[in-house]
Amino acid sequence: MPSRRALLAAPLLMLPGVARAQETAAIFAAGATKHAVEELRDAARAAGRPVPTAAFDTVGALRDRILAGERPAVTLLSTEAVAAIQARGIGPADGALDVGRTGVGLGAPAGRPVPDIATPEAFRAALLAADSIAYADPARGATAGRHVAALIERLGLTEALRPKLRLVSFGVEGVTMASRGEVSLAFSQATEIIDRPGVQFVGLLPDALNLWTVYRAAIVRDGPEARALLALLSGEEARAAYARIGFRPA
C-alpha cells in the first residue's frame, strides 16, 4: 500500500511545472554561451516557433551531468569538455561544430571609473586596488574560474586578495553582483559580460595572462530534434547572436 507521503506527493507530480522540472533540458549550455542561447530562444518565442528548453551552468558541471548519464539532445561546451564526452562514446562523430572562442575578461559596475588592465603590471595593481572581486568557484568546473584561481596564485596574490575574493557558483552570478554594485570587479568569460545591463566591460586580460577557449555545439542524443538544434546553434542567426556578445571566430 502506498505511503501517506507518496499519496500526498502524487498530485504534485501531475502539475505541468513539476513534470517539466524533472525532464532533462534539450540544450545544456555553458555560461559563456548563455546570452546567445537565450536570444535564440526569445526569437523562437516571438516567431511562434517551438522554444527549446535549456539548462545553463559551468562547463564542468554540465559535462559531469552528461558523463553521469543525463542526455540532453545537444550541448554547448568547451572543445575540451566535448572531447571528454565523445571519448566515452557519447554522441555521433559527425555531430559537433565549433561556434567561436572567447577570452577571460573583467566586468565592473556601470558608471564607475574602470581600472587600466592593459599590461600585466597594471592588471596586478588593479586587483590590489579593488575592494571586492567575484569569480566562479573553480571546484565547480568553471573555465574562467579555474584560470583566475591559477592566475592569482601565479601572480603571488593569494594572501593579499583572500579577504576581498567572492566565490560564486556560476560566472554569470558574479557579473550580476557587479551590475548591482555588490563587487568592484567580476571575472568571467568576456561573452558573459559584454552588453549586460548595469555592467561595463573593463576589457580582456592582458595577452600574456589570458586564456582563450573555443566552444562547440555537439549532439548528445542523436535524432531529428538534435540535428535541428545543432543547425539552430550553428546557423546564421546563431552566429550573429554569438558575435553580439563578443565571440570571435574559432
Image: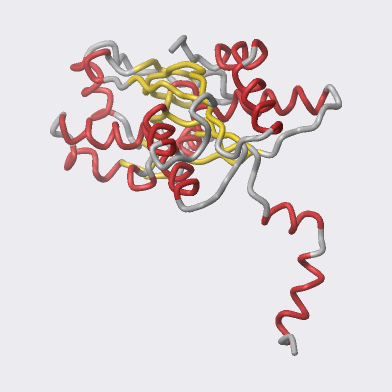
Residue at x-position 54% and y-position 34% = 75
Residue at x-position 22% and y-position 35% = 150
Residue 185 in view: no
Residue located farthest toward the left when viewing the structure as drawn: 156
Q: How is the image coloured?
A: secondary structure
Measured as percent of width and height from the top left, residue 154 is found at: 15, 31
Q: Is residue 123 above or below residue 17?
A: above
Measured as percent of width and height from the top left, residue 89 is found at: 44, 40
Left or right relative to 18: residue 32 = left
Residue located farthest toward the bottom when viewing the structure as drawn: 1
Residue located farthest toward the right when viewing the structure as drawn: 48
Left or right relative to 108: residue 243 = right
Measured as percent of width and height from the top left, residue 180 is found at: 53, 35
Residue 194 in view: yes
The foreground one among 74 and 247 is 74
**On the image, which quarter does residue 236 sit in?**
top right
Measured as percent of width and height from the top left, residue 189 is found at: 42, 26
Q: Is residue 173 above or below residue 203?
A: below
Left or right relative to 134: residue 157 = left
The foreground one among 56 and 164 is 56
Can you say which quadrant of the picture contains the C terminus?
A: top left
Can you say which quadrant of the picture contains the N terminus?
A: bottom right
The foreground one among 96 and 186 is 96
Count the marks: how many?
A: 0
Residue at x-position 76% and y-position 33% = 51
Residue at x-position 45% and y-position 45% = 61
Left or right relative to 113: residue 195 = right
